[in-house]
Image (spheres, rainbow, N blue to C red):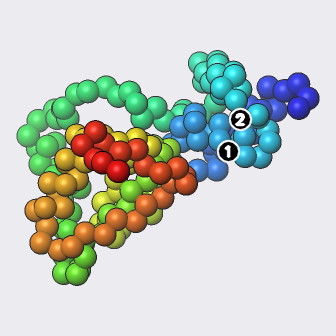
Amino acid sequence: MSPLRWSEVVDAARQVVEGYAHAVTLRQVFYRLASTGTLPLTATAYKKLSAHLAEQRRRGAFPDLLDSGRKVHLDPIFSDPGELLASVPSWYRRDRTTGQDTALYVAVEKDTLRLQVPDWLDDFGVPVLVVRGYGSQSYADVVTRRVATDPRPACCSTSGTSTPPARTSNETG
């Protein structure tokens, strides 16, 4: 591969980000660029892309990226009770799956799909599980409790790579 022209890589990355209706992660941008041959699929290329895009973002010359691993933890704040009451209707939502024979879940492996898939399924009320490519007993317990409280049989459709899911510590063979 010839030496990278980072100004061209940054422009291609900008096109990727602007092509989505929602925020995307650095990893998502990297994989899109690697899939087109714009960047090699290496840790070094990922780190350099991160540095270049961070510099551009500090200058205000590149759109924001989603960092789903970090957030500011703060309960909602309202200026007065009226503001709280005015916000309540936007929270209300009926279970759109009521009356269905089966409780459907969709599981995605990669956190980069966390915004896309729910956006596609939100109108249908289908829960989306983001498993992040590895087993988590705590997360498995949350899902198990949810399924156990629903009298319907559950069905889970998965989307991800062909890598078999990791097993949690209490699973065997």
Pointer 2 residue: 41
140 lies above or below 96 = above
27 lies above or below 153 = above
Q: Residue furthest right?
A: 2
Q: In which image quadrant can residue 97 be found?
A: bottom left
Quarter of the N terminus within the rendering = top right
Pointer 1 residue: 32
The secondary element bearing badge 2 is classed as loop
- Please state the horizontal and vertical placement of residue 14, each as a whole percent of the image: 68, 38
Residue in the picture at 79% in, 38% down: 38
Residue in the picture at 48% in, 58% down: 159
Near-viewer residue (24 or 59): 24
Rounded to the nearest whole Å, what is the CA distance between mark 1 and mark 2? 10 Å
Residue in the picture at 58% in, 41% down: 28
The secondary element bearing badge 1 is classed as helix
- For the residue marked with disc 1, what is the amino acid? Arg
User: From the viewer's perspective, is 50 left or right of 67?
Assistant: right
Identify the disc placed on residue 72: none
Q: Of tags 1 and 2, which is closer to the observer?
A: 2
- For the residue marked with disc 2, what is the amino acid? Leu
Q: Residue furthest left?
A: 81
